[in-house]
């Protein structure tokens, strides 16, 4: 099969982790007889430096023409410490999500048996956790009108959702729940927020179309607590953009490291695969970043964008093997022997 993939390495550790995911994907392609064409394109601070724009039109064209996009990370500290910066790398990420119509961010959280003691949470609480967040990705407070008034002394960010935006996300949630344990949790703050009441009302109205799915409605503050207390009580969770951003970082603790969690951002026409972690600037160029979240994002790409489950499984298998055999970066080494980003990538590719 011919696979045309846009490659957006981005900033910080992005290029290093992407390089490993490419190696592993190429090894998978070789083993299964596929032909991958990678088309690199600029995003984030790297794109601002080169062309003054974090998501240039040329990059958008490359993404639209590709069958899938593999993305590293965006963000650079020189912008974080400059609140007056007019162009920010993160704007590129938001623009990319919006322009590609990637309204659903699929963020699975699962445990690895070999790492169960690595989590700061008690083993008996987290064992067997296997849940998926569907985070709405192109609406809400991230995209509402924002600005300053009163001569800059007051700031606002509006949170806006339309029924249709909620419906299309919830539809994916119901459909996913049907393929799993038929349990869906709608996470909101309907006791306070009007947008949350619209979410709840919309999802409630959809329940009749999925009579087999049991839906629960829970407030985001309570979910934040139960997620680390009883992660096993959840299966598919749907939520708005900012709640999903926060809860998925929290949930990554269950697996042991943020460096392990992949994600897929999907819409109607395009699909993008990216680790949930950021650009980790302190580690840039040090060959210490954990490449597994990006490698597992590549596994999701084979499964979801190309419908090649065996290829995805081959990647998951080799990742498990690396974890079992201690072929890991320092974040997972518990003070023991660790390997560089590149060494882990080489080992994975060689063991596919
Ligand atoms: C994520 C990131 C982004 C977000 C940032 C970098 C804009 O934290 O993908 O979760 O907030 O969506
Ligand atoms: Mn985030």
Image: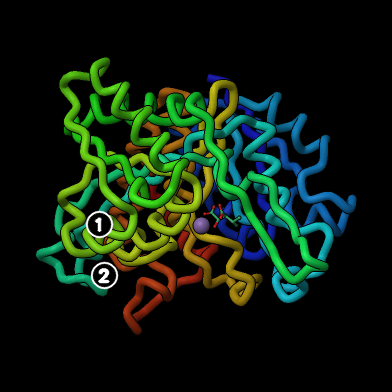
Q: Is residue 138 left or right of residue 48?
A: left
Q: Give percent across and percent down for residue 7.
A: 66, 41
Farthest bottom residue in view: 335
Q: Residues within 10 Å of mark 2 (few under 14, many from 20)?
A: some
**Is 172 in front, or is 151?**
151
Q: Nearer the viewer, mark 1 or mark 2?
A: 2
Q: Give percent across and percent down for residue 263.
A: 45, 45
* Residue appearing at x 23%, y 47% in the figure: 130
Secondary structure under badge 2? loop
Q: Is residue 317 visible?
A: yes
Q: Which mark is residue 119?
A: 2
Q: Give percent across and percent down for residue 124.
A: 10, 65
Per the image, the residue denoted by label 1 is 112
Q: Give percent across and percent down for residue 115.
A: 25, 65
Secondary structure under badge 1? loop
Q: Which mark is residue 302?
A: none
Tally the marks. 2
Q: Is residue 51 left or right of residue 108?
A: right
* Residue appearing at x 42%, y 23% in the figure: 307
Tell me which label, 1 or 2, sits earlier in the chain.
Answer: 1
For residue 327, above or below residue 36: below
Farthest right residue in view: 51
Q: Which part of the image, by quadrant, shows the C terminus?
A: top left
């Amino acid at each position: 099969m011919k696979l045309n993939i846009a490659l957006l390495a981005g900033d910080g550790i992005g290029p290093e982790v992407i390089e490993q995911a490419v190696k592993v994907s190429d090894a998978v392609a070789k083993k299964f007889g596929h032909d991958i064409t990678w088309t690199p394109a600029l995003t984030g601070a790297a794109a601002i430096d080169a062309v003054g724009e974090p998501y240039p039109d040329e990059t958008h064209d490359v993404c639209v023409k590709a069958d899938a996009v593999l993305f590293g990370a965006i963000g650079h500290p020189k912008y974080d410490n400059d609140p007056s910066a007019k162009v920010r790398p993160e704007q590129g990420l938001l623009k990319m999500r919006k322009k590609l119509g990637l309204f659903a961010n699929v963020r699975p959280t699962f445990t690895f048996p070999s790492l169960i003691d690595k989590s700061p949470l008690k083993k008996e609480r987290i064992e067997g956790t296997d849940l998926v967040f569907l985070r709405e990705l192109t609406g809400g407070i991230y995209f509402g009108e924002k600005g300053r008034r009163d001569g800059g002394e007051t700031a606002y960010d509006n949170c806006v959702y339309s029924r249709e935006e909620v419906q299309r996300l919830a539809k994916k949630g119901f459909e996913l729940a049907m393929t799993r344990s038929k349990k869906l949790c709608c996470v909101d703050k309907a006791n306070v927020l009007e947008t949350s009441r619209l979410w709840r009302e919309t999802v409630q109205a959809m329940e009749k179309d999925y009579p087999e799915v049991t839906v629960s409605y829970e407030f985001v503050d309570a979910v934040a607590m139960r997620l680390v207390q009883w992660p096993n009580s959840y299966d598919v969770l749907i939520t708005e953009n900012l709640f999903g951003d926060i809860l998925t970082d929290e949930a990554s603790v269950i697996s042991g490291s943020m460096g392990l969690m992949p994600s897929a951002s999907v819409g109607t026409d395009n699909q993008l695969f990216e680790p949930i972690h950021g650009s980790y600037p302190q580690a840039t160029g040090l060959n210490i970043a954990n490449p597994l979240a990006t490698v597992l994002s590549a596994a999701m790409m084979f499964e979801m964008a190309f419908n090649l489950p065996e290829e995805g499984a081959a990647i998951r298998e080799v990742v498990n093997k690396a974890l079992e055999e201690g072929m890991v970066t320092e974040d997972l080494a518990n003070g023991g022997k660790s390997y560089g980003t590149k060494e882990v990538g080489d080992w994975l590719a060689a063991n596919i």
